[in-house]
Image (cartoon, rainbow, N blue to C red):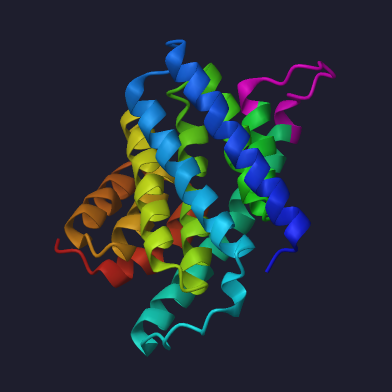
């Protein structure tokens, strides 16, 4: 568990974010659906930190999980490890090849998304959420930012589930699903959004919907790396032809 100073810093960040969000909504700078989604996300995360500060680590350990649930969770971690490693390497590679770093103080949306992704892949989930929120404040339909804000929410949900915080895990997963839904709506042809939402839908037991994303992903003819990484998930879904 993080030390008290880190938790207090995280709590301060989240409370400030909620206050800023309320001010933006009151000023009419943010639409109500986005306001409600962000507020729910911040509120869940603030509650989690508050519980940790109250000494959740001293509570009795949760009842052991069934082997099937544990195997499903491990499988999810394996999928993430493969996806994260490849996608981070690809992002960095594309950044260098395209020569997008110009020395300018203000980053382009693409450069900022890459920084947000790097934060998340390094485990700085709270910081990455704030980073993605800045991107989305500039472009609320940025499919890449929505996709990875959603995916890192999935990871936060997994961490909460491992810690026995099932209610918080469920809310985080639901919020992540909203982000991924918006990403697919914004750009139905973005393979990452389809792939990540497919993983989430599988975890939620919504197999028919996951199969729809699997079919769409195949029709998109994604890069070979995406095909290789999603094949195990699609095989588990065993979608009807």
When the figure is inspected, residue 222 is found, relative to residue 27, above or below; the finding is below
Q: Is the magenta stretch mostly helix, strand or loop?
A: loop
- Screen quadrant of the N terminus: bottom right
Q: Can residue 192 be seen in this view?
A: yes
Relative image position of residue 6 (x, y in whole percent): 74, 54
Q: Give the range drawn in magenta.
A: 96-110
Relative image position of residue 90 (x, y in whole percent): 64, 45
Q: Nearer the viewer, residue 238 or 119?
A: 119
Q: Nearer the viewer, residue 58 or 141?
A: 58
When the figure is inspected, residue 237 is found, relative to residue 201, above or below; the finding is below
Quarter location, residue 169: bottom left
Q: Report the residue at 41% width, 47% height from top.
A: 176
- Screen quadrant of the C terminus: bottom left
Disc count in the image?
0
Q: Report the residue at 28% width, 62% height from top.
A: 204
Relative image position of residue 69 (x, y in whole percent): 37, 80
Quick one: which residue is furthest to the left in this view? Answer: 240
103 in the magenta segment: yes
107 in the magenta segment: yes
Quarter location, residue 67: bottom left
Q: Nearer the viewer, residue 113 or 44?
A: 44
Q: Report the residue at 32% width, 49% height from top.
A: 218
Quarter location, residue 31: top left
Q: Report the residue at 44% width, 74% height from top.
A: 73
Q: Can residue 150 be seen in this view?
A: no
**Is 240 left, or right, of 130 in this rendering?**
left
When the figure is inspected, residue 176 is found, relative to residue 18, above or below; the finding is below
**Is 130 left, or right, of 62 in this rendering?**
right
Quick one: which residue is furthest to the front in this view? Answer: 54
């Amino acid at each position: 568990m993080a030390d008290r100073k880190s938790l207090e810093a995280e709590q301060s960040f989240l409370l400030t974010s909620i206050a800023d969000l309320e001010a933006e909504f009151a000023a009419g700078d943010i639409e109500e659906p986005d306001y409600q989604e962000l507020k729910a996300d911040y509120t869940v995360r603030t509650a989690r930190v508050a519980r940790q500060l109250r000494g959740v680590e001293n509570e009795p350990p949760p009842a052991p999980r069934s082997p099937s649930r544990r195997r499903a969770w491990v499988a999810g971690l394996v999928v993430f490890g493969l996806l994260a490693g490849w996608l981070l390497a690809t992002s960095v590679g594309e950044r260098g090849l395209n020569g997008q770093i110009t020395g300018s103080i203000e980053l382009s949306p693409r450069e900022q998304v890459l920084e947000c992704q790097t934060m998340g892949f390094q485990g700085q989930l709270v910081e990455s959420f704030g980073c993605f929120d800045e991107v989305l404040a500039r472009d609320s339909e940025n499919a890449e930012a929505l996709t990875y804000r959603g995916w890192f929410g999935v990871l936060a949900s997994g961490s909460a589930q491992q810690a026995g915080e099932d209610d918080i895990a469920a809310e985080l997963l639901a919020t992540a699903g909203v982000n991924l839904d918006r990403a697919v709506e914004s750009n139905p042809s973005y393979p990452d959004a389809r792939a990540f939402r497919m993983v989430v839908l599988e975890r939620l037991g919504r197999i028919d919907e996951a199969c729809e994303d699997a079919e769409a992903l195949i029709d998109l003819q994604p890069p070979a790396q995406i095909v290789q990484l999603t094949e195990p998930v699609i095989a588990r879904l065993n979608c009807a032809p």
